[in-house]
Amino acid sequence: MGHWGKELTDPPGVDGRLAVDVLPKPLAPVSVAIGGLPATIEYAGAAPGNIPGLLQINARMSKDVQRGDKVPVHVRIGPASARTASLWPYAD
């Protein structure tokens, strides 16, 4: 999932420089809840090859998440909370 407007990063992002060799990570803690259950964050940082300010989050949802047509996803970065979205889960 992608998220715009992340807080401060380490190292700081550089306007106009694509994230290729250095991938800044947010200084604030990142958490994701999927279906109301905490997800395991596998990666939270710059989206490789993209512009500064685009955060990529790779999260693994709990096997206990209820299956259904739409599952709510809630992202929190430090004190900031994103609007809840929905996803359509699939098994690989």
Image: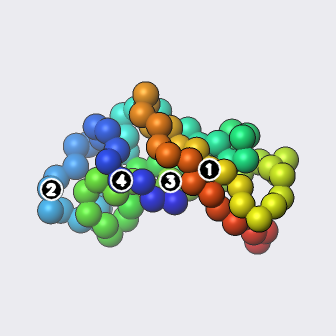
Give left or right: position of 56 versus 37.
left
Q: Which mark is residue 4?
A: 4
The residue labelled by disc 2 is 15
User: What amino acid type is highlighted by mark number 3?
Assistant: Ile
Residue 59 visible, this angle:
no
- Tell whether label 2 touches label 1 (CB within 8 Å): no
Image coords of residue 28 (percent x, y): 40, 32
3 or 4: tag closer to the N-terminus = 4
Question: Looking at the picture, does residue 26 appear above or below residue 22?
Answer: above
Q: CA distance from mark 1 to mark 3?
A: 12 Å
Which of these two is toward me, 2 or 17? 2
1 or 2: tag closer to the N-terminus = 2
Q: Residue at x 52, y 60 (%)?
A: 1
Q: CA distance from mark 2 to mark 4?
A: 14 Å
Q: Residue at x 71, y 55 (%)?
A: 71
Which of these two is toward me, 60 or 83? 83
1 or 4: tag closer to the N-terminus = 4
